[in-house]
Amino acid sequence: MKLAAMETAQLRQLNQETAKRYEDFKALNLQLNMARGKPCADQLDLALGVLEALKARSEFANSNGDDSRNYGIWNGLPEMREIFSHMIGLPADQIILGNNSSLQMMYDCISQGTTHGWGGCKPWGRQENIKFLCPVPGYDRHFAVTEYFGIEMIPVPMLKTGPDMDMIERLVEKDESVKGCWCVPKYSNPTGVTYSDETVRRFAALKPAAKDFRIMWDNAYCVHDLTDTPDTLLNLYEECLKQGTEDNVLYFASTSKISFPGAGVAALGASPRNIIDLKKRITTQTIGPDKLNQLRHILFLHDIDGVYSLMQGHRKILEPKFHIVQESLERELGGLGVAQWSKPNGGYFVNLDVMNGCAKRVVDLCKSAGVVLTDAGATFPYGQDPNDSNIRIAPTFPPQEELAQAMHLLCICVVLAATEKLLADRL
């Protein structure tokens, strides 16, 4: 029965019963953390071979004959760039490798736009009222980067097909101050949405008023499938070539959730003209990335088939956890009319929307009972969810037993917050 349809006496009784269940949970003194989408220890163990790959190796030359222990190779080892070429869909010679953090590479690209500009245009820092489009709910660390540089962020609603392209086209093609758009195109953080073919083609067809407009295409979950029917993502670069808009996009990926988040390899893909801009900065900034770590990954993964094989190991660990989340939400909240949630085919998150005005209360209740969630509002620019309804569930890190406990508590908190609000509204 939907809670809103209950008589006030029934609702009050449910509130009291739920409050008792909540206090029972508090007495357990739980200490569980679901705040970030981190791989668990079992996942990290899958890649221990990376650390052992160089033990018996005395030859450190790559296919170009360069010694990986020395200076040089500003854009990274060719074998590793070839692996990323298959992952993000650009030619290997248009890919630049970094160290473990693709976020740092994104930060550097925003910094480059701010201090030196893109495509020969005036630096963003010397232009007025610079804006970035931010699909919401979205990735809080993306928003933190643009906020750090003082760039105004415009929320764009996420639909089942991806960002609202009508809104994006209207803003991008008419407003020269709109300089970019954040995107997580496959298994978006946190909604789990994969952009439709039409959405990808509309991104490729954008004719921005600003010549220095750049789409930040963060394909963080490009190989992170969790079902036998995974989502597919159209190749944006190929679509851009058809439209002559290849300079509009910067592409990002990493092995952070493939091997080790703290010791992986990141990648940045770009058009040949953007590569020229990037090379000037990067070759001033560094003589080269950590090539020994790249070599370890090459020896362990071998090629893209090795990546897919490793990701099957990740799936075996993560798929049951996502089932726990779905079963808990359906069992305890299904039919109550107080929550909606995503059912992604991959990625790292489940998106939960509770009753308007209840998200902060739910997160606070969970925290008080020993379960830490991502802050309510974090999935919106400036941490401000206008409806106070969105909660990001990150099920990957806790063991299954702890995850089941956490989900049980979360559902209790959702019902408790909903009954409190409904009763308050009836006063």
Image (tube, helix red, strand yellow):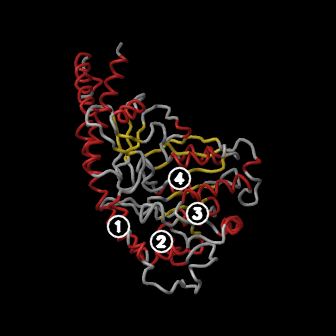
Which mark sits nearer the N-terminus, 1 or 2? 1
Which mark sits nearer the N-terminus, 4 or 2? 2
Question: Which circle marks residue 240 in the picture?
Answer: 3
The type of residue carrying mark 2 is His
Query: What residue would you read off at disc 1?
Result: 46
Task: Specify the quadrant of the image occupied by residue 391.
Answer: top left
The type of residue carrying mark 4 is Cys
* Of the two numbered discs 3 and 2 in the rendering, the one whose residue sits closer to the viewer: 2
Which mark sits nearer the N-terminus, 3 or 1? 1
Query: What residue would you read off at disc 2?
Result: 86
How many labels, in total? 4
Identify the residue at horizontal 63%, vertical 73% (top origin): 74
Q: Are marks 3 and 1 in contact (CB under 8 Å)?
A: no
What is the C-alpha distance between the residues marked 3 and 2?
17 Å
Q: Nearer the viewer, residue 336 or 65?
A: 65
Percent coordinates x, y for residue 206 in the rendering:
61, 54
Q: Secondary structure at mark 3?
A: helix
What is the C-alpha distance between the residues marked 1 and 2?
21 Å
The type of residue carrying mark 1 is Leu
What is the C-alpha distance between the residues marked 3 and 1?
36 Å
Percent coordinates x, y for residue 234 in the rendering:
47, 62
Query: What residue would you read off at disc 4?
Result: 183
Q: Secondary structure at mark 4?
A: strand
Q: Is residue 383 above or below residue 92?
A: above
Q: Is residue 274 above or below residue 397?
A: below
Mark 3 packing: few (<14 Cα in 10 Å), some, or many (20+)?
A: many
Identify the residue at horizontal 61%, vertical 79% (top origin): 70
Which mark sits nearer the N-terminus, 3 or 2? 2
